[in-house]
Image (cartoon, rainbow, N blue to C red):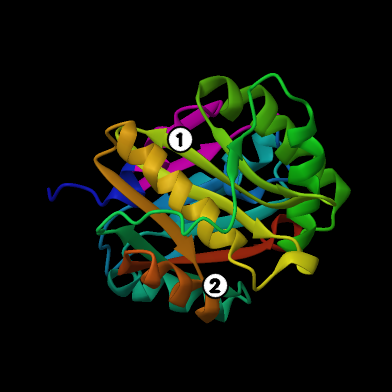
Amino acid sequence: MDRPSPALRYFRASDLLLERVEPTWWGAVVTDSRFPAIHDLNYARVDHVQPDLTMAEVLRTLLPALEASGALHIHMVCFEPEGTATLLADAERRGHPISWDQVLEFRGPPIDNPGLHRVDEIPPGEDRVWEILRRAYVEFDLHDTRVQDELLEWVRTVLRPTGRRFFVVEGPAGVQGVGSLDIRDGVAYVDDIVTFPEERGRGVATAIVIRIVQEAIRANAESIFLLADAPAAVRLYRRLGFAETGRIASTLAPREHTTAPRP
């Protein structure tokens, strides 16, 4: 089997932090009863090209696991979407919308912060990171307070103690932007990149991403990647040395509207 992509390596390693990972012939079903409202932590991970895989096959394993964890949604993530067309078409026929993320990997060369903004790391013991992240979730159009609370608990009790780092740009009026770095299995994931509305267009995100890339290089990460869907964000990351290396397809629907297929 081919060596998995950096994105798949990272998410496989991240999934091991969760309560249950059930391997399947097409990937894995991953669940965690501590965070039932977070669909990204209760999902089916389709790892490789599987041209004949159907949604009924995935649901045979996924639905019982979701019921056991109390998860609220049916979520599938396909790391080779061009090779899982049958599955994705089946999901669409069932009314499960599909979203797409570009996978961008850092190819260099490293660049320096142009000096417009100072980027500081938030020390692990500082609680103000939680308020900053809650503000960031709103900018990601995530307004459900239950989901926000569970995400903060996931970061506080699982990700932060195992290495996730946060970086901010601050000005006279407070925090202007935030971003995070997480390294698993030698792969660095750039995440949580947000510039707050009143500060946009001033190079805040640029400075944060440059600092995170520099930190990942210092940590000897083998690969550095991020996910993006907005064209403006993709253009920014290209300017900073990232190249598009693939796509990830995701489906999402409420669990209560789907019944388990017959064996």
* Total numbered labels placed on residues in the image: 2
Dot 1 falls on a residue whose secondary structure is helix
Q: Residue at x 70, y 36 (%)?
A: 35
Residue type of the residue flagged with mark 2:
Ser
Q: Where does the magenta region start and end? A: 10-34
Residue type of the residue flagged with mark 1:
Ser
Image coordinates for residue 211, horizontal then vertical, percent? 47, 46
Q: Left or right of 212: which side holds 5?
A: left
Q: Residue at x 73, y 30 (%)?
A: 153
Dot 2 falls on a residue whose secondary structure is strand
Distance, label 2 to label 1, CA atoms, is: 21 Å
Image coordinates for residue 81, horizontal then vertical, percent? 35, 69
Q: Residue at x 37, y 75 (%)?
A: 86
Give neighbour class at mark 1: few <14, some 14-19, many 20+ (Cα, 10 Å).
Answer: some
Q: Which residue is mark 1?
A: 14
Q: Which residue is mark 2?
A: 99
Using the rendered image of the protein, determine whether residue 65 is visible from the camera's viewpoint: yes
Disc number for residue 172: none
Q: Relative to the observer, which residue lies in front, 221 or 213?
A: 213
